[in-house]
Amino acid sequence: MKALLTIASRNILRNRRRSLMTGSAVAAGALATLLFGGYASYIFAGLETGNVQRVGHLTVFRAGYFLFGSGNPAAYGIDRYQDVVTLIRRDTVLRPLINVLTPTQSLMGIAGNFSGDNDASKTFIGVGLIPSDRDRMRRWDEFATGVTYEPDTRLSDSDPTRGLIGFGLARILGLCAPLILQNCPPIPKRPETGEEKSAPISEDVRELSRREADGAGSKSSAPHLEILSATAGGAPNVVTLTVGGAEPQGVKELDDNFIAMPLTLAQQLVYGRGEHKATGIVVQLRRSEDMPKARARLNTLIRDNNLGLEVRDFGELTPFYGQAVKLFSAIFLFISLVMGIIVLFAVVNTMTMNVMERTNEIGTSRALGVLRRDIRRQFVAEGWLLGAIGASAGSALAFLIAAVVNHAGLTWLPPGNANPVPLRLAIDGNLGLIIGAWAGLVLIATIAALLPANTAARLTIVDALRHV
Amino acid sequence: MISVVPITTAINPETLVVRLRDVAKIYKAGPIEVPALRDVSLAISANRFSMLIGKSGSGKTTLLNLIGCIDAPSKGSVEVCGQDVAGLSDDAISEFRSRNIGFIFQNFSLLPVLSAFENVEYPLLLIGTPASERRDRTFAMLRAVGLEDQAGQRPNELSGGQKQRVAIARALVKEPQVVLADEPTANLDTATGAAIIDLMRRVQSQLQTTFIFATHDPQLMSHADELFAISDGQIVDHKTGGRQ
């Protein structure tokens, strides 16, 4: 083996320029595969982190909610949800796996800003949550994506009336000035028509709001919205939401409709004086790899206790994640294939030329007693070595570039995100990618050498010796 | 003074090392058949310095190729070292060659990526000789051809004569029963060629190896123990005696 590799390495050095070009093709393959693979891995980690921070790993819903609940969330509330939370929290299998366990309430309705001269209203999609749990969920960063955690005081356990709205919703409802939002124009004055005076919905909401406020006591002077929704029983209900701030949501449809509020406020709106329920119990795990185990255990608990619930993971709740993973995986596969084909042809070409140039040597070796299979092995070893050297060089270069990029402080705005995130190449420690790219390219180079090697092995000695 | 490792297998001088019976070789170029050898029969005894002489295209190289088991006859049988090679597989013939036959080519045919030492050592590597023995025998053989000091040099750093000396050392290092030399002096100047012939003759004498030597140069006839004159693929004359 030592002699084989010694001769192979010397033969590679014999035609340095050709070997350099071929090795460069392999190195370029390794570089492209690793850099894009590292980029895709970081994207996957970033998307997963964003989703897990927002919706957790798993969510327990009432059976049927996932398919039909968004049309009427109030009808799909989990009965005695606190008992379910306690059941999960006390489970010895789940307890060590869970980072955050928190109930949420989805809701929809109409939000209106009738303060001062304002008379704007808009349908909304909302979520009620426990602010401190939301805060803990936002700190989850298993993959060390580098996204800086910033404490958010716009939602607080201590203020059950304060909420957060989408940037677009703030604009539509005329809250740009009160919230001091940049790049947020005021509502343009509408031309007066007779129709508007005939639909004074705002007066009804104002009245309901006034009654609620009288019951609740004082109302602050901070920007606020009147939130109207139907209760689980079908009756209209209104609460006042103090707007703590506006946050861009990335997707315009969500940005123009989003309201986050404390769970108690959402429950008050949806269930009134009835039993307060929750539409979901969010489970954020410490590690994503525990997701199948946690899901199986949750299903067991639900089945054993006849709870009539179902479990969904973040991939099901946010299809964009799966689509992005598929898209990037497809691009990665395409790049890998193109690089593989380039390497294949480069090595075949080089090895074919090597066989032609060394035909006489092949004849000499065979005359001396070298077996056909050893001739084949010699050329395959050269292909392998070319692949190994090129892939190693490309990998080293990829590490270097990744280190530079990762320390350059570059940022980018992923699709669906409102804020830029650090641009990183997740190569370091990504053993699957590194070994896969290296071994794949070396394998291609070895296979590529096999065809010329077979040609060399099949040469007749006399013809090879006659070759000039 | 030549100092080489003594041959380990004593061969009876009367033993036939090569025997060809009614051998023909026909090359085919499309529909055209070109006979290179026609009904050649010959026998060469051990420890001879035999010469095949004839003009270019007479069939010398073809005959050497058949004796060297690197080509197969179209007709007839070839026995080398008592072995009829016709029935052997490709691997078995390669193995047979690696142990019993040494080659010296007109164009030296040294492996350019190997040093002189490594070129000489290579045949021993093929037959699985242990490393320490390989080293000793290789140095001994390089000493025998006067190239001990050039052991580390690559073929492109050697002169034509030195290359052919390395080729001779390579052919002899494994102590083969037969050494085949095809026009070994054709690419050398007269003085160097004469020195190479002299070296081959002395080594052959000392190692008691059978040398079969093809040339078109009549001036070299005086070196032979036995002479086969070839013309148009047939042996037209056979003389024994010479320097024996």
Image (tube, grey):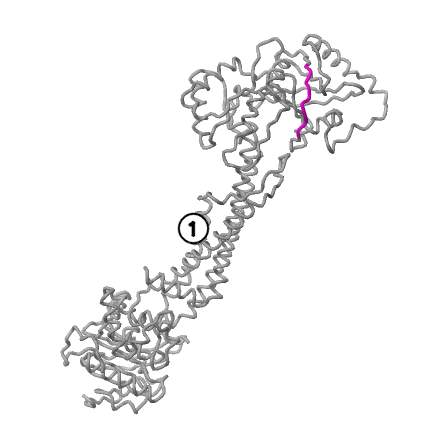
By secondary structure, the bulk of the magenta-drawn segment is best described as: strand
Q: Is residue A245 magenta?
A: yes
Q: Is residue B207 above or below residue A109?
A: below
Quarter occupied by residue B121: bottom left
Residue A9 % position (x, y)? 39, 63
What residue do we see at 48% from left, 51% from top?
A395
Give, as a single range, the part of the protein colored magenta.
A239-247
> In the image, is A236 to the left or to the right of B164?
right
The C terminus of chain B: image quadrant: bottom left
The N terminus of chain B: image quadrant: bottom left
Q: Is residue A368 above or below residue A266?
A: below
Q: Observer-nearest residue: A78 or B132?
A: B132
> In the image, is A51 to the left or to the right of B193?
right
Residue A431 % position (x, y)? 44, 44
Q: Observer-nearest residue: B115 or B62?
A: B115
Q: Observer-nearest residue: A150 or A276?
A: A150
Quarter occupied by residue B119: bottom left
Residue A286 % position (x, y)? 47, 29
The kind of residue tagged 1 is Ala
Q: Is residue A24 magenta?
A: no
Residue wearing tag 1:
A439
Q: Observer-nearest residue: A296 or B207?
A: B207
Quarter occupied by residue A216: top right
Say what secondary structure mark 1 lies in.
helix
Residue A374 % position (x, y)? 33, 63
At label 1, counting other C-alpha atoms closer than 10 Å, the crowd grade (few under 14, some 14-19, many 20 or more) is some
Q: Is residue B86 above or below residue B45?
A: above
